[in-house]
Amino acid sequence: MRKPRQIVITGVSKGLGRALVDQFIHLGMNIVGCSRNENAIRSLQEQYPDHHFAAVDVTDRSHVDRWATQIVSQVGPPDLLLNNAAAINANAPLWEVPPDEFEHVMRVNITGVFNVVRALVPSMIERQQGIIVNFSSTWGRSVAPEVAPYCATKWAIEGMTRALASELPNSMAAIPLNPGVIQTDMLDSCLGDASRMYPKPQEWSAAAAEFLLDLQPSQSGEPLSAPRL
């Protein structure tokens, strides 16, 4: 039986974030989660009344700051912070991506992670404890056509997280994580029916949750990948 830990997860309304909520709670962890989807948050809070879920737009710095202040005052700094929330562009050559769509992907995938780190990591540093995992992608270490904006953001997450790792106390860690290729709505949008050949989030989370709980400060800055199924 693992010792309960405080875990903060962004992007919990669906996909990997939603699957991790179920798995971590099954393992006895205490969960704080957020998403912009108010209906999904309401459903999660009803299903898991002993945990904390909030409708938060990670691109809104003031909203994130208020949420973080509430988290720290109510349950304390996170032991494990998972920046999972992400967006992807509709398949298109880079020169055909609408500017508003490009900027949205940048705001969610880069600025959103920065906002959450800025709001929560100081309380973790004060305690000299905690692991920060910023979700990267297979396309944060390689590229593919028609998803250039998404690739750009995930390459940025790799660099930003490794730089963050060099700034933290030795008792903490920041890790860029490639979760692998999982059948989520984002993969469906890229591959269509071909996405069905990949594992579903629920299958992935069973191994990934244990892997995440086992991360150590000595791994800070290492570009890691979740276990393959």
Image (tube, rainbow, N blue to C red):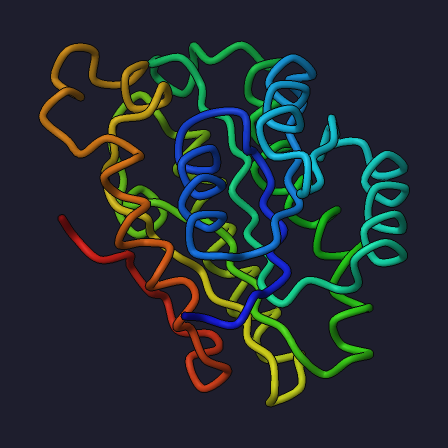
Which residue is depicted at the point 56% across and 37% down? 109
* Location of residue 88 by image quarter: top left
Taking depth in this image into account, of 187 and 68 the one nearest to the observer is 68
Q: How many marks?
A: 0
Is 214 rendered above or below residue 185? below
The N terminus is located in which quarter? bottom left
Residue 152 in percent (x, y) is at: 45, 40
Residue furthest out toward the bottom: 170
* Location of residue 34 by image quarter: top right
Residue 208 in percent (x, y) is at: 32, 54
Is 83 rendered above or below residue 203? below
* Location of residue 170 by image quarter: bottom right
Taking depth in this image into account, of 49 and 106 the one nearest to the observer is 49
Is 170 rendered above or below residue 192? below
| Residue 9 in view here | yes
| Residue 103 in view here | no
Residue 51 in percent (x, y) is at: 67, 43
Residue 126 in percent (x, y) is at: 82, 78
Which residue is depicted at the point 61% across and 19% down? 43
Which residue is depicted at the point 55% across and 21% down? 102
Is 123 rendered above or below residue 127? above
Which residue is depicted at the point 42% across and 73% down? 215
Is 47 situated left or right of 58 in this image? left
